Amino acid sequence: MELIERVDAKRVFLWLTAAALAVTLMALILGGIRAGGREGLVKELLAETDAEIIDAPLTEQQARWPLEMQDGQRVELSQLPRDTLVFVNFWATWCPPCRNELPSMLKLRQSLGDRRFAMIAVSYDDDWDAISTFFKAFRGGIPAPSELFVLRDTAGDGQLTLRETFGTTKLPDSYVVMNGRVLARFVNVRNWTHPSIVDYFRLLAPAR
């Protein structure tokens, strides 16, 4: 009888050990699937929107590029908040496609209010008067930085511009940056409320 009890106990121990190993293995497998699935979904969403994967660090020049605020102060891309998905849009008030996509940009920002997400609009206007006049007619004034952080690249004619360091002279052009890395590029005007675009940003932007 004692021998049978020892055998049964051994069987129970082996069964519990095997079950624990199975649970651990399943967790590892599911974790791998989720990780791979997330990366695959990001690529799939980018393909649907015809965006370009960059996945490269900001260069020192890009990170230290001085951009002008409305009050004349300067800010650099190196000062972008960490653990926040940052949308960088190159635009100008004299660019019709740039003006056309602004409403959908602001709607995208609103839809990601529960996420760590920031939107920066780098203008190539000659001065702040043009920017102020445009936004006053468009929506009563320049948006608050928490909604749309409007900056100006002050590089003059014949000088290298920030957008050129990103490899573009086009307007509009938009880039996705996080933790000092350029993740993707969206060329030309977009409807930023397109479901695939919204899903892409929601997938990458951390929850608050």
Image (cartoon, grey):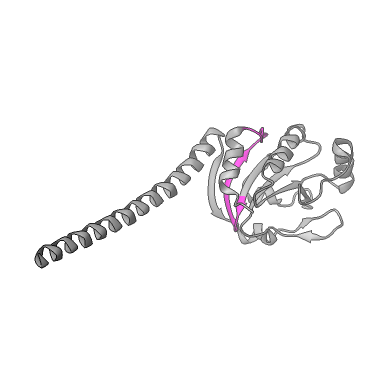
Say above or below: 38 vs 73. above
Closer to us: 169 or 189: 189
Image quadrant occupied by the N terminus: bottom left
Residue 84 locus on image (x, y percent): 63, 55
Closer to us: 31 or 105: 31
**Residue at 66% over, 44% down:** 112
Total marks placed: 0
Residue 164 locus on image (x, y percent): 66, 48
Residue 206 locus on image (x, y percent): 59, 52
Residue 7 vs residue 20: left or right? left
Residue 104 vs residue 56: left or right? right
Closer to us: 61 or 74: 74
Closer to us: 14 or 52: 14
Q: Is residue 179 magenta?
A: yes
Q: Quadrant of residue 74?
A: bottom right
**Residue at 63% over, 60% down:** 82
**Residue at 55% over, 34% down:** 50
Say above or below: 88 vs 11. above
Q: Which residues are magenta?
A: 177-194
Residue 208 locus on image (x, y percent): 64, 54
Q: Quadrant of residue 18?
A: bottom left
**Residue at 56% over, 38% down:** 51
Q: Is residue 128 magenta?
A: no
Residue 200 vs residue 27: left or right? right
